[in-house]
Image (tube, rainbow, N blue to C red):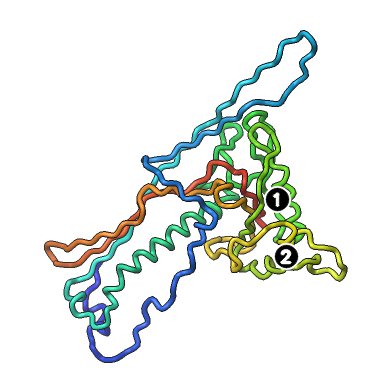
């Protein structure tokens, strides 16, 4: 396919006219607020979990000290993918365009790439309850777990914990209280309580008004009494990732709490930054423009992510 003058006759006419093209700017990059960028130098990235030592035990007088060993878990490999888009346009179309529309098309490759990267990264969260595409290092019986699961296993002892509200609860005081409590009792691979900062509330734009009420109301919303709100930002520390919500989320009712960027393990692996190139077809003289980048998105560690698929 290529762009030729018969397809855009209005562009080659000099007559004054209003041509609406790229009238609106894209929204800010949202995944960069949550996902850490990992620079990769290989064709893939490997992850493996290791649990350290267990807990202390009684040592009766005269008895030897018990010894313990670290435990290694399974390895997960993430292979990078190349994502690309191009277009071609006839030399005549380039020469005859009276409104400089065609010459703006290369810039749209950049916007297209930005949009694709947003959809790619947020696709990990969209798959978080199913694990059809993305799974982490936690597993049981050889089956890896989704980002949000009711039975995340600890490598050292095999005990399980949940970073998922099951049954699901809608975004509400009750739901936030339950998930915040679950986050506060998260343990490590060795079953030690750890400091996980519940900081970011993520939701679809449909829930932005509910989120504002919950996080900005000092008293318990929806009641006639003066009970203090337990989830208001000034008490809980929770803040929305973005006040208007994340439009790349497919569920309009699911919601999530994440530790800050760098403390959660959501990542975009950048193997090759976005590149632009151009060429001219030797036979047709068509101008061809391309853009591509190479990378992947994944998580290895579920800790720092909690969700409710309401």
Q: Tell me the residue at 64%/58% (across/down).
A: 201
Q: Earlier in the sequence, mark 2 or mark 1?
A: 1
C-alpha distance separating marks 2 and 1:
18 Å
Relative side of 236 to 138, left or right: right
Q: Residue at x 55, y 61 (%)?
A: 250
| Residue 126 tag number | none
Closer to us: 241 or 140 = 241
Q: Residue 38, position in %: x, y? A: 45, 47
Residue 171 in the image, given as x and y percentages of width and height: 70, 61
| Quarter holding residue 190 | top right
Residue at 22 percent of width and 74 percent of height: 4
**Which residue matches tag 2?**
214
Q: Residue furthest right?
A: 225
Badge number at residue 165: 1
Judge whether 190 appears above or below 91 on screen: above
Q: Quadrant of the N terminus?
A: bottom left
Residue 97 drawn above or below residue 310: below
Task: List x then y, in percent, for residue 30.
Answer: 51, 61
Measured as percent of width and height from the top left, residue 17 is found at 32, 89
* Relative vertical location of residue 59 with respect to residue 212 in this rendering, above or below: above
Total numbered circles: 2
Q: Quadrant of the C terminus?
A: bottom right
The label nearer to you, 2 versus 1, is 2
Residue 113 located left or right of residue 93: right
Q: Secondary structure at mark 1?
A: loop
Q: Pick out the residue farthest to the top.
A: 62
């Amino acid at each position: 396919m290529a762009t030729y003058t018969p397809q855009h006759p209005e562009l080659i006419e000099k007559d004054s006219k209003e041509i609406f093209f790229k009238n609106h700017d894209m929204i800010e990059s949202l995944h960069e607020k949550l996902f850490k960028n990992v620079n990769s130098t290989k064709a893939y990235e490997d992850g493996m979990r290791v649990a350290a030592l267990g807990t202390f035990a009684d040592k009766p007088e005269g008895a030897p000290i018990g010894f313990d060993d670290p435990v290694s878990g399974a390895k997960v490999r993430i292979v990078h993918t190349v994502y690309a888009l191009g277009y071609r346009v006839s030399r005549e179309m380039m020469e005859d365009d009276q409104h400089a529309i065609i010459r703006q098309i290369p810039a749209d490759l950049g916007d297209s790439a930005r949009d694709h990267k947003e959809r790619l990264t947020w696709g990990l969260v969209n798959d978080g309850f199913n694990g059809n595409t993305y799974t982490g290092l936690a597993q049981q019986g050889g089956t890896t777990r989704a980002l949000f699961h009711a039975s995340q296993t600890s490598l050292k002892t095999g005990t399980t914990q949940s970073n998922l509200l099951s049954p699901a609860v809608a975004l509400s005081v009750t739901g936030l209280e339950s998930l915040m409590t679950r986050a506060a009792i998260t343990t490590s691979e060795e079953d030690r309580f750890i400091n996980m900062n519940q900081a970011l509330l993520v939701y679809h734009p449909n829930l932005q008004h509910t989120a504002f009420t919950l996080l900005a109301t000092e008293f318990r919303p929806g009641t006639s009494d003066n009970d203090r709100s337990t989830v208001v930002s000034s008490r809980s520390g929770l803040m929305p990732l973005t006040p208007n919500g994340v439009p790349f989320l497919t569920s309009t009712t699911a919601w999530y709490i994440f530790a800050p960027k760098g403390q959660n393990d959501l990542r975009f692996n950048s193997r090759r930054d976005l590149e632009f190139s151009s060429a001219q077809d030797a036979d047709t003289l068509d101008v061809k423009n391309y853009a591509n980048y190479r990378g992947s998105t994944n998580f290895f560690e579920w800790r720092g992510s909690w969700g409710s698929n309401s």
